[in-house]
Image: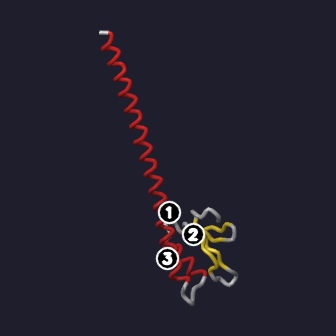
């Protein structure tokens, strides 16, 4: 009788521990999937903005306002702000010279912005 009680107790503890392990990994997988989806969405937005800006900026009559409009249209949120000499719209930072010509583009995921 005592041996079966010990075996049942051990198996019950093992079952609880394995269920806790599975629960932890299920939660971890869900969080990882959410972060992966956010990273995918950010990358897709940056690509769409880059292509939109490239189409406009390569034209001979490209202006600052037309480039900004193209970047804003391709962004999920068209809010913009200035930081370190760049106009940030969505995932892209656009640097212009005094005459309104596009000098460079930075991405929010660039390690050296």
Q: Tag 3, which secondary structure?
A: helix
Quarter holding the N terminus? top left
Q: According to the image, label 3 marks what residue?
A: 51
Check contact, mark 3 vs mark 1: CB within 8 A: no
Relative to 95, is 90 on the left or the right?
Answer: left
Residue 23 to residue 6: above or below = below
Q: Residue at x 42, y 47 (%)?
A: 30
Q: Tag 1, which secondary structure?
A: helix
Question: Sequence-wise, which precedes: disc 3 or disc 1?
Answer: 1
Quarter holding the C terminus? bottom right
Question: Sequence-wise, which precedes: disc 3 or disc 2?
Answer: 3
Q: Nearer the viewer, residue 111 or 88?
A: 111
Q: According to the image, label 2 marks what residue?
A: 92
Q: Residues within 10 Å of mark 2 (few under 14, many from 20)?
A: many
Which labelled disc corresponds to residue 50? none
Q: Residues within 10 Å of mark 3 (few under 14, many from 20)?
A: some
Colour mode of the rendering: secondary structure
Q: According to the image, label 1 marks what residue?
A: 42
């Amino acid at each position: 009788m005592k041996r079966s009680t010990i075996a049942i107790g051990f198996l019950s503890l093992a079952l609880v521990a394995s269920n806790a392990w599975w629960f932890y990994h299920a939660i971890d997988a869900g969080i990882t999937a959410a972060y992966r989806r956010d990273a995918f969405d950010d990358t897709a937005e940056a690509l769409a903005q880059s292509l939109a800006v490239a189409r406009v900026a390569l034209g001979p009559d490209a202006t600052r306002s037309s480039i900004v409009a193209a970047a804003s249209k391709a962004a999920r949120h068209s809010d913009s702000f200035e930081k370190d000499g760049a106009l940030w719209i969505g995932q892209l930072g656009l640097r212009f010279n005094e005459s309104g010509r596009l000098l460079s583009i930075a991405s929010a995921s660039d390690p050296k912005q």
